[in-house]
Amino acid sequence: MKRLSTTDAGFEAAFVALLAEARETTEDVAEVVRGIIAEVRARGDAALCDYTARFDRMAVTPAGLAIPAAEVDAAVGAIPGPLMAALELAAGRIERFHRAQLPQDLVLPDETGLTLGMRWTALDAVGIYVPGGKAAYPSSVLMNAIPARAAGVSRIAMCVPTPGGVLNPLVLAAARLAGVSEIYRVGGAQAVAALAWGTGTIAAVDRIVGPGNAYVAEAKRQVFGRVGIDSIAGPSEVVVVADGGNDPRHVAIDLMAQAEHDEAAQSILITDDAGFAAAVVAAVEAELSVLPRAAIARASWVAHGAVVLVRDFGEAVALVDRLAPEHLQVMLPDPEGFFARIRHAGAAFLGRACPEAIGDYVGGPNHVLPTGRSARFASGLSVFDFLKRTTWISSRGADAATALASIGPAAMALAEAEGLQAHGKSVAVRLGLA
């Protein structure tokens, strides 16, 4: 775990090294993925069945790729009531927040007599990729599918691997709550290829979203352009900005909540209190002695964790913006005032009683967020990922000729300057000038 202080002579070099740290996988899977995509394009369902048998150790026929409604019914019926209620609470909060994001169409008459506008329409079909097996995450289903439904997407197809035939019932329940139209027991790069290009069983979609391993991420990269994608997500990360008024154990657990994701996750504490920093580090050690995923969390903390000591929290603002973290927790007396000065963060959690884990499950805003400092230019998943804009210009009626006469000559001049004479002529003929 790195210890940095802004008062140290070597701080800038150490902080730059922290920013430059590579945590993404270095495994080169591009050629393997390219071959899988080519096989799925050429052989369709037969390739999906072969890969499912090979990678997921499950024999399946094309007729068995789709998970039937009866299987979903049985899974939902087996879920304990309190757990189902928690899932429903999360789904309701996520849907309410994302429906509130829906934009309005724009209609703008201008002084020339033209009317300008912009119309929003939903995508026709979206593919959701969900990791499978015992480590499946129903929250990921809700976060990826509900914004699509709120946007008005009519078809939501989900692919989820079932290694050894294992499928988490909560994933199926979440899919039903989120409005998923169809579910397929297919995983890996082959699932992404099927969603992008289509097979006999799985119809192609327009955008693919959802997390996955290195093969899934590379497949999304390779099919981009054929379809849209959400992002190429990297390891999870959190920056906690906290003063000495906090309980060190609370902060330690918040740091470990990110570290337990995987060994490449990153947890950073920024504080102005050296004694508090030491207490948090000690509390981390205490938590690592009891956490079930302690081996993963410790590997993350040792390799990528950091404690940054600042003179004051004014210094912390610039450091946070340079880190541009996926998650930002502000545990200060005036968290809103601090956050108002921050420009780059995927999502923020303000106050001593607002841990990032609330956002992972039941807060309402999306937990699919930009990683690896990409919050400098990217945003979290939202209804806007499932909508597209079409602009329009209308020139009709009595004002049409006046409007064209007002702005047409400028268009003609610019077209002539660019050497595109037919462009200019298409305006000129309507003005009686050609």
Image: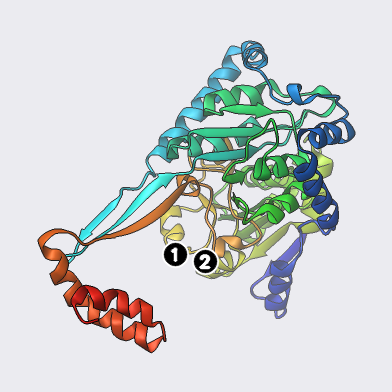
Q: Nearer the viewer, residue 259 or 420?
A: 420
Q: Residues within 10 Å of mark 1 (few under 14, many from 20)?
A: few
Q: Quadrant of residue 196?
A: top right
Q: Which quarter shows the N terminus?
A: bottom right
For residue 324, which quarter of the picture? bottom right
The residue sitting at 35% across, 58% down in the picture is: 391
Question: Does residue 4 sit above or below 434 in this rendering?
Answer: above
Residue located beneath label 1 in the image: 341
Instruction: Tell me the distance, in whole angstroms, between the alpha carbons under discs 1 and 2.
Output: 7 Å
For residue 382, side relative to residue 6 (left or right): left
Q: Quadrant of the image for the C terminus?
A: bottom left
Residue 403, compared with residue 212, is above or below; it is below
Q: Amino acid at mark 2?
A: Val
Residue at image location 20% in from the left, 64% down from the top: 114
Whole-percent x and y of residue 288? 79, 41
Task: Please tell me which residue is depicted at 60% across the width and 19% down the height of the picture.
Answer: 83
Q: Are marks 1 and 2 in contact (CB under 8 Å)?
A: yes
Q: How is the image coloured?
A: rainbow
Residue nearest the viewer, comparing 182 with 415: 415
Of 43 and 314, which appears nearest the observer? 43
Q: Amino acid at mark 1?
A: Arg
For disc 2, the marked residue is: 317
